[in-house]
Image: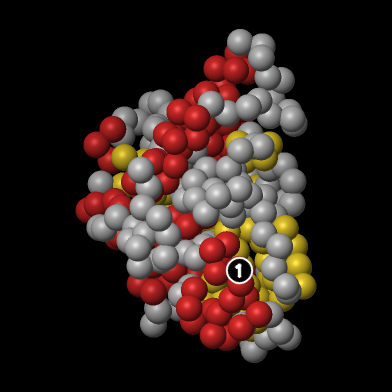
Amino acid sequence: MSAQALVETALPLELVRRGKVRDVYAVDADRLLLVTTDRISAFDVVMHEAIPYKGVVLTQLTAWWLGQLTGTLSHHLITADTDAIIREVPSLAPHREALAGRSMLTWRADVVPIECVIRGYITGSAWKEYQASGTLAGEALAVGLRESDRLKPSIFSPATKAETGHDENITINTVVERVGPDTAATLEHLARTVYAFGRDTAEPRGIIVADTKFEFGWRNGELLLIDEVLTPDSSRFWPADQYEPGRGQPSFDKQPLRDWLDVERRAGRWNGEAPPPTLPPEVIEATSVRYRDAFRRITGAPLDFSRLGLPQPA
């Protein structure tokens, strides 16, 4: 492990859960600490190697978006400033290097077990279902759509949360059955609000937000936007200057990794399951660059590593 590539954390707090990417710790009865590692998964398999700066990008981009959204809706972020976090939790001071740039102090919330997906374009699992049956989560879509066509209007396409494997698309009626009509309507309204803001912010910067997913949680009778927001891990970002309906699109995320793994699979060197193959350095670097480029394009400035107390990438 290095300061640039963090695989796992070991902090003097209660570990609530360790997900594919995030380590979540309890600070007290009211607050959590989210640390975004550099772990990466593809095709539902977590790689052995980490992607330098990936966790920093995801954390700082989420913090940037939540800053833009303050006043529009409520969210769980208290601070993503490392010094401020250590002032609040002094026992973390010896772990500053592991926390720098990749940690968020947040309010606790009772998570709503629904992935609030908004699809602005038809791609991924939605395109696969549409090809097979002309539907999305069993509901009919317009006839004659091409892969990557824009959906007008965008579609609220909820899914069940899955700890492993793919989330499962569900109907809005299923959401209503699980959380009630008022909560279902609020979830859709909030998800559409954030997606529209993200789409309209990214478009003039040359990025199409094809689809994205949000999570929400209850705190003091209010739904808060939680977890990551409009990052390359939770969204499909496409370069607008390369957009061409009728085919899959390149994306600002782990595309170099997926492409390399596809080659390994087709060549019979990997069966698509764990354990994954060893990633070559050039794939790790290309993926890291892709994440950092997404941050620069969306926010209009490169990550300020010195401000975060991190070494500058070579």
Residue shown at 59% from the left, 76% from the top: 93
Check disc 1 and report its element: helix, strand or loop: helix
Residue 147: give x, y in percent of width and height.
44, 31
Identify the image's colour scheme: rainbow, by chain, secondary structure or one colour: secondary structure
Q: Which residue is mark 1?
A: 95
Residue 29: give x, y in percent of width and height.
73, 85
Q: Can see residue 209?
A: yes
Residue shown at 25% from the left, 58% from the top: 300
Vertical order, 163 against 44 (above or below)? below
Give the residue type at disc 1: His
Vertical order, 240 against 114 (above or below)? above
* Residue 11, picture quadrant: bottom right
Q: Is residue 162 left or right of residue 117?
A: right
Q: Can see residue 227?
A: no
* Residue 265, picture quadrant: top right
Could you say which is closer to the camera, residue 251 or residue 188?
A: 251
Vertical order, 150 against 43 (above or below)? below
Residue 54: give x, y in percent of width and height.
49, 50
- How many marks are shown on the rendered structure? 1
Could you say which is closer to the camera, residue 145 or residue 31?
A: 31
Q: Is residue 271 left or right of residue 92?
A: right
Residue shown at 68% from the left, 85% from the top: 30
Instruction: In the displayed orientation, state which residue is furthest to the front.
Output: 94
Residue shown at 68% from the left, 19% from the top: 270
Label 1: how many residues lie within 10 Å, few (<14), some (14-19) or many (20+)? some
Residue 97: give x, y in percent of width and height.
54, 63
Vertical order, 45 against 87 (above or below)? above
Could you say which is closer to the camera, residue 129 or residue 168?
A: 168
Q: Quadrant location of the C terminus?
A: top left
